[in-house]
Image (cartoon, helix red, strand yellow):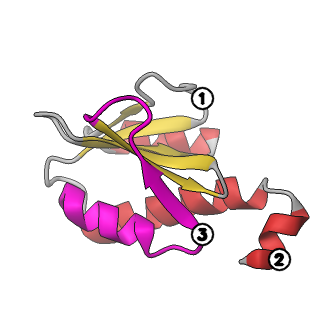
Amino acid sequence: MNIEQIRHYCLSKPNVTESCPFGDDTLVFKVFGKMFALTALDSAPSINLKCDPELSYELQDRYQAVKPGYHMNKKHWITVEIDGTIPSILLTQWIDNSYKLVFDKLPKKNKKLN
């Protein structure tokens, strides 16, 4: 997957918005105003995703392209380098998981709109 495919996939999820609150080199995806993914658009593309801590450590051990979340809480976020080594199916599952982790913490009134 490349950054444009990731962007399209994130925006296909219900109630997702995108913005660049940190400058033109970082694209942020939110569900009802809560971040679930951030993509770096610079020379070393990557995506930060929310992740269950136990799964985070497992993924970091298994995949060289998965690191602790850059500029994020290292326990709850991972950074995945978009270098072609992670299969698209895994990356979409990790995006889905990040979205679900954030969505599940939303107030009930927002969940009813989904």
Q: Residue furthest right?
A: 108
In this rendering, position of residue 92 left or right of residue 76? left
Disc 2 and disc 1: Cα gap in Å?
29 Å
**Disc 3 and disc 1: Cα gap in Å?**
26 Å
Quadrant of the image containing the C terminus: bottom right
Residue at x 30% of width, y 62% of height: 6
| Residue under numbered circle 3 | 15
The magenta stretch is 1-25
Quick check: 107 left or right of 34?
right
Mark 1 lies on residue: 75
Q: Say which amino acid is labelled 1.
A: Lys
Crowd band around label 3 with a 10 angstrom C-alpha radius: few (<14), some (14–19), many (20+): some
Q: Work out whether mark 3 precedes mark 1 in sequence or the reverse, and give the earlier one.
A: 3
Name the amino acid, label 2: Lys
Q: Quadrant of residue 84?
A: bottom left
Can residue 36 be seen here? The reply is yes
Residue under the point 64% across and 63% down:
100
| Residue 59 falls inside the magenta stretch | no
Residue plotted at (89% across, 65% down): 108
| Front disc: 3 or 1 | 3
Residue type, mark 3 in image: Asn
Q: Position of residue 87 (x, y in %)?
A: 24, 64
Is residue 57 something one can see in this rendering?
Answer: no
Q: Between disc 2 and disc 1, whose residue precedes?
A: 1
